[in-house]
Amino acid sequence: MTTSTIDIDSKKQFAQPKLQTNQPPQQQVEIQQSWEWAKVRKIALRQMDKFMDLFPPVLRHEDLTAVNEMRVSCRRLEEILDIIYGKPRPRHIKKLRHRLQLCRRTLGELRNCDAVLAMADNAVATRRSDIEAWKALSEYLTPLRARTAVVTLEKLGRLNLATPYLRIKRDFDLSNEHRLNQGAARAKSQAETAIVYQRIVNSLASRWQDFAVAVERSHDDPCEHVIHRMRIAAKRLRYLTEVMGKLHIPGSKETLDWLKSLQATIGIWHDLEIMQRMLREIVAHCKSFKLEHLTAEHITRLIHHNSLIKKKSADMFFQMTRKTDHYLQVKHWVSEVLAAHTPKSNHH
């Protein structure tokens, strides 16, 4: 894996980003000003539809990747809802965000189990070294995953997400109907567009601050919970950048490419940390686990193997975030986007 997909010589890609990408003719201003608001709502509805579509395969155990996809969809939804619904948020949006968070947390342990099981199955399929140890781990994890799923999916089934989904669709339908009946007054459209961008830059300032702090902490103390926070901060920044890319804000695509590469590196590191913890728990409480083919020798081999890979992932992460050209370019891009909005803020 390369450290980034950004062309370090293309510094113009990061220069002087502007929140509004086009300057339409005067007669088109009204249409252009309402486009951003319609776009973010369209993104929200697509994410809601995708989220609801994931319920059947998750509940039926049809696809091991569906659990992780549902958790990713939750985070994307939270990010876009924060742009559409500012504080103080309507009661039904507060409930939806709370349920989305519950959904993510409920599926967290199952997702971790899936991640480790996928690594074990991949090692077996590719006939990696110590294949017997990987086979034993896979045989151990399969029934564990099944037991975890029973408890997890029962909790998930109790979450009522259909009602807030229908409420959001009704919100958007009523808004569109009002616009058709009343017409999009130019001043109102401009105000709506300003709100969208204001919330984006507010979120960007917050997300970048959390990300930068998490990067520094991970350098000082690269333990599991710190890496976990680093991973969350990177995800939030990435999903916000995805929305910015859909609005054609310059520099978003290049930043997104780098964040995807970074997140992949963090993800491997984080999953290896989870596996190490799981293996240590098995060793510490071997009498509590029903171990048939998974022996202490197997576990020792896997811990050693994972330690080597984990170090490589950690080194790659540090290389990508220790004031490299790519990291500094993204930092500069964030600063330019925030600065581009400052004059507008002074007029509100």
Image: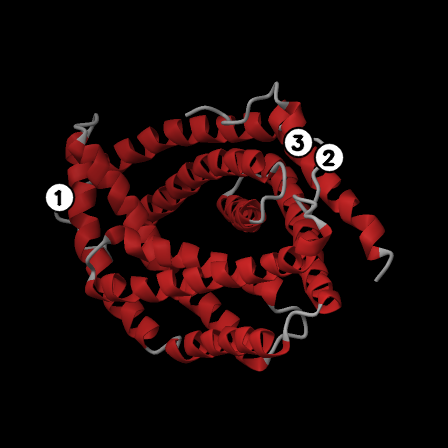
Front residue of 124/81: it is: 81
Judge the density around disc 2: few (<14), some (14-19), many (≥20) Cα neighbours within 10 Å: some
Front residue of 125/240: it is: 240
Q: Could you tell me the amino acid type at mark 3?
A: Phe
- The residue carrying mark 3 is 14
Q: CA distance from mark 1 to mark 3?
A: 54 Å
In the picture, residue 340 is in which quadrant?
top right
Image point 54% across, 58% down: which residue?
A: 39
The total number of labels drawn is 3
Relative to 85, does residue 108 appear above or below in the rendering? above
Q: Could you tell me the amino acid type at mark 1?
A: His
Q: CA distance from mark 2 to mark 1?
A: 60 Å
- The residue carrying mark 1 is 293
Question: Can the viewer see residue 94 in this picture?
Answer: no
Front residue of 59/17: it is: 17
Colouring of the image: secondary structure
Q: Is residue 241 left or right of residue 107?
A: right
- The location of residue 242, given as percent across then percent down, is 53, 47
Say if mark 2 contacts mark 1, CB within 8 Å: no
Q: Secondary structure at mark 1?
A: loop
Judge the density around disc 1: few (<14), some (14-19), many (≥20) Cα neighbours within 10 Å: some
- The residue carrying mark 2 is 16
Q: CA distance from mark 2 to mark 3?
A: 7 Å
Q: Secondary structure at mark 2?
A: loop
Which circle's residue, 2 or 1, is located before the other in the chain? Answer: 2
- The location of residue 55, given as percent across then percent down, is 29, 66
